[in-house]
Amino acid sequence: MSVDVLLGLQWGDEGKGKIVDVLTPEYSVVARFQGGPNAGHTLEFEGIKHVLHTIPSGIFRKGTVNIVGNGVVIDPVTLKREIDALTKINVDTSASLFISRKAHLIIPTHRLLDAASEASKGSEKIGSTLRGIGPTYMDKTGRNGLRVGDIESPDFLKRYEKLRNKHIHLLNQMNFEFKLEELEPAFMEGIALMRTLNFVDSEHEMNRNILAGKQILAEGAQGSLLDIDFGSYPFVTSSNTITAGACTGLGVAPRHIGKVYGIFKAYCTRVGSGPFPTELNDETGEAIRAAGKEFGATTGRPRRCGWLDLPALKYAIMINGVSDLIMMKSDVLSGFKTIRVCTHYEINGKKMDYMPFDIVNEEVKPIYKDLPGWNKDLTGITAEKDMPAELASYIQYLEKELQVPITIVSVGPDRRQTIRRNVAELIS
Ligand code: GDP
Ligand code: IMO
Ligand code: MG
């Protein structure tokens, strides 16, 4: 009778898509609760790679109900593209995909406003994915937004034009050049497709499923350090990416939250601008990027790479109430002689073990502990007993520091490259 939540503890791209797909057989319902097509969630099985942006990562498992909650922002253009791609490979979404009427719509001028805002910021730009996320959430909180349920209204077009014209006015004020006529036809095609989808009052669906005793998994997007309240503001996204976001983004009361799975990479990455204390601007960073194929699933941009940051991870665990940790991409660190872990920051000569208010303007010097690496290919390992001793010590060290068990260790992008650990013996 509870909703488990799975979310990223770093700056996104931790591997949420893969693990949601791995865990889906244990759940009847998978639900997205925030973000939009800024997300790119990758799944790999049977030699094929799939990238989802709006649709929950439970979609490939037959019989699973997939809900896009009220907290998500939906671009009909991207959604159509995703559904078309799934249809091509015979994944039928007609009986398994449900969209909240209260989810907000991204319209083409939201994307233009995102681009105009970034252009006006120059070197201080956020490094947004340019998917219109910020402007759409601004219209939501500004109480001007268009919602999925509005598509069912006879005056939808009038409402769309009213919002679009307001945006055109803003874009002109910003002296931003654009060709809306090139974007609107695809939007209208997307809206036409959306009219064929299952719209639901998702808060009722969710609570009906909870009462019926169904197992439900809420799938986060982005990561905790991109959270609008607790991330590295202003270099964040525009939604609550943390556990609390699952309550507001799905209409689930806090007392119904069960397990909280927190996902992190065995190192750190970030795409876009903003502070990154453990970033490596050297050949080690390059080596991690190459081994981890660290290029964005949505924008293709190279991801910035660095060592694991424990103060940041501890912060994310605290804010989210993480009960189970999942460590991803352990295989990427194979072959590194030494693996570094940041245990503290030094700021203005002071040693700190938590993230201060301003890590944007202050110089943050990471203090590292060095651990021995493992020189073994992990990608074929499926049982804990076959792990190299150095990896086992790395995991043990992290569990002791973080005081949360690491219940899954991922050793490759494929579904099968996943090691489940026996929780009973953990943390001493
Ligand atoms: P998400 O946004 O959190 O779902 O993560 P992304 O899909 O954006 O990025 C994770 C990338 O790492 C994808 O290309 C995955 O296929 C890949 N991946 C996931 N887990 C592992 C792993 O354990 N090892 C390796 N080498 N790649 C992984
Ligand atoms: P998934 O779900 C990584 C980053 C952008 C930018 C900032 C704001 O795949 O982990 P936005 O478009 O939201 O206004 O961009 O947030 N960002 C992500 N980085 N993974 C994501 O999603 C991201 N979604 C947004 O790069 O720095
Ligand atoms: Mg991603």
Image: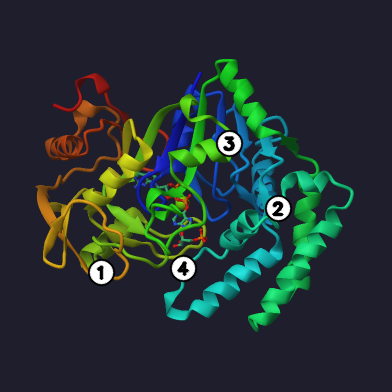
Q: Name the residue under label 4.
A: 127
Q: Mark 1 or 2 closer to N-term?
A: 2
Question: How was this image coloured?
Answer: rainbow
Gap between marks 3 and 1 measured at Cα: 37 Å
Marks 1,4: beta carbons within 8 A:
no
Q: Which of 273 and 140 is in front in this view?
A: 140
Task: Point out residue 394 in the picture as x, y percentages from the top left corner.
Answer: 16, 40
Q: Mark 2 or 4 closer to N-term?
A: 2
Q: Name the residue under label 2.
A: 76
The residue at the point 75 percent across, 53 percent down is 190
Gap between marks 1 and 2 measured at Cα: 41 Å
Q: Mark 1 or 4 closer to N-term?
A: 4
Gap between marks 3 and 2 measured at Cα: 20 Å
Task: Point out residue 132 in the picture as x, y percentages from the top left corner.
Answer: 60, 62
Left or right of residue 423: residue 92:
right
Mark 4 CB near ligand 2 (8 Å cut): yes
Gap between marks 2 and 4 measured at Cα: 23 Å
Q: Mark 3 points at which residue?
A: 250
Count of marks overlaid on the render: 4
Q: What residue type is labelled 3?
A: Leu
Q: Which amino acid does label 2 sit on?
A: Pro
Q: Mark 3 or 4 closer to N-term?
A: 4
Disc 4 crowd rating (10 Å Cα; few below 14, some 14-19, many 20+) is some
Gap between marks 1 and 4 measured at Cα: 20 Å
Q: Which amino acid does label 4 sit on?
A: Gly
Q: Mark 3 or 1 closer to N-term?
A: 3
Q: Mark 1 points at which residue?
A: 362
The mark lying in front, picked from 3 and 4, is 3
Q: What residue type is labelled 1?
A: Glu
Report helix, strand or loop for mark 2.
Answer: helix
Disc 2 crowd rating (10 Å Cα; few below 14, some 14-19, many 20+) is many
